[in-house]
Image (cartoon, grey):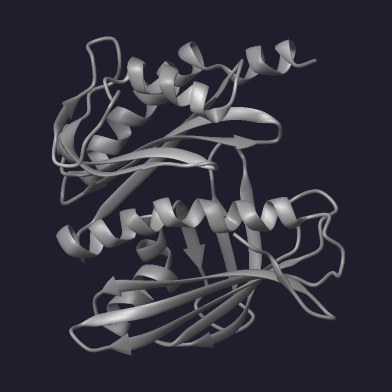
Amino acid sequence: MTVKNDAEKRWVELDVVFPGTPEQLWHAMATGPGISAWFTSTTVDGQEGGAIAFDFGGGAVSRGTITAWQPPARIAYEEREWKGDAPPVATEITIRARSGDTCVVRMVHSLFTTEDTWDDELEGFEAGWPGFFEVLRAYLQHFAGQKAAAFRASGVVVAGTHHDAWREVSLALGLSGPNVGEQRTTPVDAPTLTGTVERVQQGAKTCEVMLRLDHPAPGIAEVGTYSWGGKARTAVSVYFYGDGASEAAAEAEPQWRAWMAKRFPESEAESTHA
């Protein structure tokens, strides 16, 4: 993964082909309900100059201003306080129709600086999106247009790399040695998830497994580990779909947050690294 640069800025870019029409992709990538169905809880004031906000839970909200609004082809926004004293990050998403009811989506993240101080964060954006894009792909294929409710629970693994963290997390959740097409169920001492392995990704930046869920409700779960801020971290993102989605999420979210707080508490990691 390479950060590109010119005399004014540094940026990373991704081009991805998705099933669906431009209107379906626009809904999924430029509206609050659409983004919330595959990424994180999001609100969008759909107009140039409108606000966009990504709520990651625990009080972590990234807010931005929409700088371009051209449905169903292009949205751009700028986030100014996304991390400490970093320069604003500008995001542009363009949607272009292809044959066979598919679209090419291009996403570009730009920092208007000539310094390489924030290149790790830019590369982190690039590395983080593919997992969420696979959730989006599964949503478009299996659940498009259905009601959605989602949540994310995360923790910190005290010692080792994110690969070490994955060995620990996958063992705890019954996901060791996953193969696409297998049916997996979490053990009795973890919150219940039962589903089919849809995707396995193990690389230098992340380790991830995606399940298409049958229980406790139809949906998608993404379980993964990654490195951030010098620590190995783990996260479970769960997306329920259908008329019972909100009820299923309301019941499951506190269970997952309690499990993470017990097994991988952030406070313990902070005191260990102090």
Q: Would residue 37 be seen by someone viewing this image from the given angle?
A: no
Where residue 137 sits: x, y (%)? 28, 61
Q: For residue 273, which quarter of the picture?
A: top right
Relative to 234, say whether 127 is above or below. below
Identified at 49% across, 40% down, the residue is 206
Where residue 130 sits: x, y (%)? 43, 56
Where residue 9 sits: x, y (%)? 78, 75
In this figure, what is the number of numbered marks?
0
The quadrant of the picture occupied by the C terminus is top right
Identified at 33% across, 56% down, the residue is 134
Residue 103 or 35: which is nearer the viewer?
103
Q: Would residue 185 be seen by someone viewing this image from the given angle?
A: yes
Drawn side of residue 108 relative to residue 148, left or right? right
Relative to 274, say whether 1 is above or below. below
Q: For residue 249, which quarter of the picture?
A: top left
Q: For residue 66, which quarter of the picture?
A: bottom right
Where residue 208 sits: x, y (%)? 39, 39
Relative to 267, say whether 178 is above or below. below
Identified at 58% across, 26% down, the residue is 161
